[in-house]
Image (tube, helix red, strand yellow):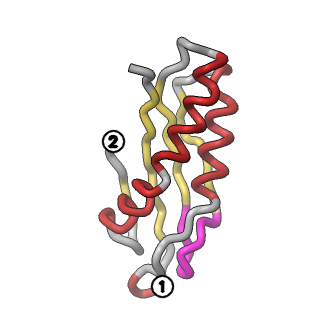
């Protein structure tokens, strides 16, 4: 998985916080996978972390899960919205684009 970070927090800091949320995000997928066994694809989010380390905006910028993945997208969005990051050096905002790959195999 790759990520793009613009200003604010470093890629390493962002990756560490996202890694801590990995099991929660995986649960979003596995819950829907029970109902839709063929569900797989990629969800890319773009989110903004303000100078206090709070996520202030989250958008799904791409999803290959289709209509069957709407619940997964909404769940991942909620999780990311609730994450807290360290205050970035200089207090500036951080814009992150991050892809999550979902595959049951």
How far across and down, in percent of the image, does residue 98 sit? 43, 48
On-image quarter of the N terminus: top left
Q: Is residue 91 above or below residue 93?
A: below
Q: Residue at x 49, y 21 (%)?
A: 40
Q: Is residue 6 left or right of residue 46?
A: left
The picture places residue 82, in percent across and down from the top left corner, at 63, 61
- Please state which of residues 63 and 103 is positioned toward the viewer in this rendering: 103
Relative to 20, does residue 7 appear above or below in the rendering?
below
Label 1 – label 2 distance at C-alpha: 27 Å
Mark 1 residue element: helix
**Where is residue 88, by image quadrant?**
bottom left
Q: Residue at x 42, y 33 (%)?
A: 101
- Count of marks placed on residues: 2
Mark closer to the observer (1, 2): 2
Q: Which mark is residue 57?
A: none
Residue shown at 63% from the left, 47% from the top: 77
Neighbour tally class for label 2: few under 14, some 14-19, many 20 plus, Cα within 10 Å:
few
In the figure, is residue 31 to the left or right of 41? right
Q: Is residue 99 magenta?
A: no
Secondary-structure class at tag 2:
loop
* Outermost residue, top side: 38
Q: Residues within 10 Å of mark 1 (few under 14, many from 20)?
A: few
Q: Which mark is residue 91?
A: 1
Please tell me in which quadrant of the rendered image residue 103 appears: top left
Side of 43 where 35 appears, left or right:
right
Q: Earlier in the sequence, mark 1 or mark 2?
A: 2
Which residue is rendered at x = 63% and y = 58% of the image? Answer: 81
- Whole-percent x, y for residue 7 in the image: 39, 71
Q: Which residues are magenta?
A: 48-56
On the image, numbered disc 2 is attached to which residue? 1
């Amino acid at each position: 998985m790759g990520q793009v970070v613009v200003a604010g927090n470093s890629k390493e800091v962002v990756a560490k916080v996202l890694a801590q949320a990995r099991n929660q995000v995986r649960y979003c997928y596995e819950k829907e996978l029970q109902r839709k066994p063929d569900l797989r694809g990629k969800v890319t989010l773009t989110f903004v972390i303000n100078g206090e380390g709070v996520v202030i905006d989250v958008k799904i910028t791409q999803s290959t899960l289709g209509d069957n993945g709407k619940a997964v997208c909404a769940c991942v969005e909620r999780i990311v919205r609730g994450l807290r990051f360290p205050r970035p050096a200089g207090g500036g905002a951080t814009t992150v684009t991050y892809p999550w790959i979902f595959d049951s195999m």
